[in-house]
Image (cartoon, rainbow, N blue to C red):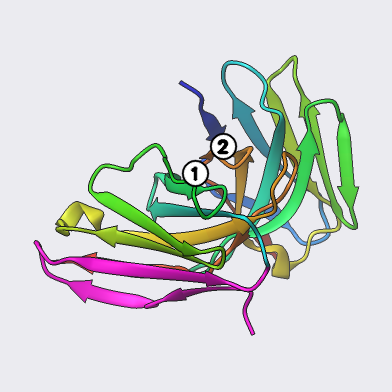
């Protein structure tokens, strides 16, 4: 089984709809992250959480919110989706500490019409 | 602002040769740099991490360098194989990722 899972894998929605992307991990890591990837722009950090009670904004948090329901679960919500939020979304985890690599999920392809 | 710059053009290398990818960063040196591999439609996979006080790191056919004077990291794949074809991402810690360089190993 995959260590970091994301649901759904693909989603098409309409402008103005609320949508939630979910991430679960079995690695036992404290730290979790949400990124989006757009062609030609690379990965950009949306939100990150260093433990269950910690939530921090990243570079592009406007229009998004998150919830850390447990150590293993980190959800990303789009309260009112807009077309420029069409992108590939990745969740990642890492151990606490400075020099630790990240483990990425398979991604969610979101299309907002 | 901090930036990570990678050559956005695709790199074509003949099988068996060494592929060298470049990552340049701006402003102060990061505590570490990371390199990831990404295949189409999939999540990035970690390859190597190099700390600011390390000059070079190796793992099998992979080697990464960190030059704080040039503000640059080089990523090498020796004896390249068609299976090495992918996009390679450089990251400043976990905060800023480059756009990636597409590598094609030609048989």
| Residue under numbered circle 2 | B6
Q: Quadrant of residue A81?
A: bottom left
Q: Is residue A40 one of those drawn in magenta?
A: no
Please give the label number shown on residue B99: 1
Q: Nearer the viewer, residue A103 or B100?
A: A103
Q: In the picture provided, is B53 more to the left or to the right than A71?
A: right
Relative image position of residue B55 (x, y in whole percent): 87, 29
The quadrant in which the C terminus of chain A is found is: bottom left
Quarter holding the N terminus of chain A? bottom right
Taking A92 as reference, is A59 above or below it?
Answer: above
- For this orientation, the residue located farthest to the left is A16
Q: Hey, which quadrant is residue B34 in on the image? A: top right
For marks 2 and 1, give the CA distance: 6 Å
The chain that hosts pointer 1 is B
Q: Which comes before the other along the chain, label 2 or label 1?
A: 2
Residues packed near mark 2 inside 10 Å, few (<14), some (14 to 19) or many (20 plus):
many
Whether residue B98 sits left or right of residue A66 in the image: it is right
State the residue at coordinates (55%, 59%): A92
Figure check: B59 above or below B30: below
Q: Chain of mark 2?
A: B
């Amino acid at each position: 089984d995959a260590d970091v899972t994301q649901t759904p894998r693909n989603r098409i929605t309409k402008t103005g709809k609320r949508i939630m992307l979910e991430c679960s991990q079995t690695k036992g890591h404290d730290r979790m992250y949400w990124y989006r990837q757009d062609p030609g722009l690379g990965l950009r950090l949306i939100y990150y959480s260093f433990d269950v009670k910690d939530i921090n904004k990243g570079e592009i948090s406007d229009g998004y919110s998150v919830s850390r329901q447990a150590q293993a679960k980190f959800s990303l919500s789009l309260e009112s989706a807009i077309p420029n939020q069409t992108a590939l979304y990745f969740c990642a985890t890492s151990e606490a500490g400075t020099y630790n690599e990240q483990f990425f999920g398979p991604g969610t392809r979101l299309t907002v019409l | 602002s901090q930036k990570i710059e990678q050559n956005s053009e695709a790199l074509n290398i003949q099988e068996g040769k060494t592929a060298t990818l470049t990552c340049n960063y701006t402003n102060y040196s990061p505590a570490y740099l990371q390199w990831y591999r990404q295949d189409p439609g999939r999540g990035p996979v970690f390859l190597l991490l190099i700390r600011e006080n390390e000059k070079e790191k190796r793992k099998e056919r992979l080697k990464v360098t960190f030059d704080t004077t040039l503000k640059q990291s080089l990523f090498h794949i020796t004896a390249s194989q068609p299976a090495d074809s992918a996009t390679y991402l450089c990251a400043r810690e976990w905060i800023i990722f480059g756009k990636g360089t597409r590598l094609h190993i030609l048989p």
